[in-house]
Image (cartoon, rainbow, N blue to C red):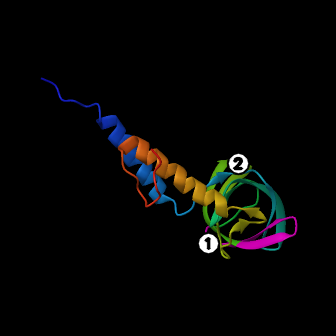
């Protein structure tokens, strides 16, 4: 009569989750922190939207930036250089930008991200196991 599609949704969700996890090299963490952004001799205040070991998404930017341009971000006494990898105009007076660290570290301007990344991978693996019945990585699965 008809086909049994009961496993279709679970397989599709598992495939989508796996592809999303593989696209990102580093786990993102939603974190709003005030930062100073210095470029071409000017400094402006902005904030992070989310963080990863390799970079961040910045919001509240008002100065014109160029993809590929190097900027310095400062938070308190922590300072590091980043490259602009994408820019999005939100409205006439505000932009967001993706920045990539030129000096990869286990922290983002003093915020420790090393444990967050491992926990994110474990969470994705557990979700994949629940959805598809098989783990993506070599992490042991508790049943």
x, y percent for residue 134: 36, 50
Q: Quick one: 90 or 118, which is closer to the camera?
A: 118
The residue sitting at the bottom extreme is 103
- Location of mark 2 (residue): 92
Height in image: 15 above or below 69?
above
Height in image: 118 above or below 9?
below
Q: Quick one: 117 or 68, which is closer to the camera?
A: 117
Q: Along the polypeptide, which appears first: circle 1 or circle 2?
A: 1
Give the number of the mark in front: 1 or 2: 1
Badge 1 element: loop
Q: Which residues are magenta?
A: 67-81
3D distance between C-alphas at marks 1 and 2: 22 Å
The residue sitting at the top extreme is 1
Height in image: 89 above or below 39?
above
Count how many numbered circles sit on residues in the image.
Answer: 2
State yes or no: residue 62 in magenta.
no
Q: Quadrant of the C terminus?
A: top left
Q: Quadrant of the N terminus?
A: top left
Q: Quick one: 82 or 39, which is closer to the camera?
A: 82
Asked if residue 50 shows in the view, the reply is yes
Q: Residue at x 33, y 42 (%)?
A: 11
Mark 2: few/some/many CA within 10 Å (<14, 14-19, 20+):
few
State yes or no: residue 74 in magenta.
yes
x, y percent for residue 76: 87, 64
The residue sitting at the left extreme is 1
x, y percent for residue 114: 66, 64
x, y percent for residue 103: 68, 76
Label 1 close to label 2 by CB (< 8 Å): no
- Identify the disc placed on residue 68: 1
Mark 1: few/some/many CA within 10 Å (<14, 14-19, 20+):
few
Q: Main secondary structure of the magenta part?
A: strand
């Amino acid at each position: 009569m008809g086909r049994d599609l009961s496993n279709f949704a679970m397989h599709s969700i598992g495939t989508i989750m796996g592809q999303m996890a593989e696209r990102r090299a580093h786990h993102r963490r939603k974190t709003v922190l005030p930062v100073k952004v210095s470029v071409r001799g000017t400094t402006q205040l902005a904030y992070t939207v989310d963080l990863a070991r390799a970079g961040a998404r910045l919001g509240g930017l008002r100065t014109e930036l160029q993809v590929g341009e190097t900027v310095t971000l400062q938070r308190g006494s922590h300072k590091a250089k980043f490259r602009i990898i994408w820019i999005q105009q939100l409205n006439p007076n505000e932009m967001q930008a993706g920045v990539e660290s030129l000096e990869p570290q286990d922290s983002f301007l003093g915020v420790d991200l090393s444990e967050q990344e491992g926990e994110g991978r474990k969470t994705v693996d557990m979700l994949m196991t629940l959805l598809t019945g098989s783990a993506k990585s070599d992490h042991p699965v508790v049943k």
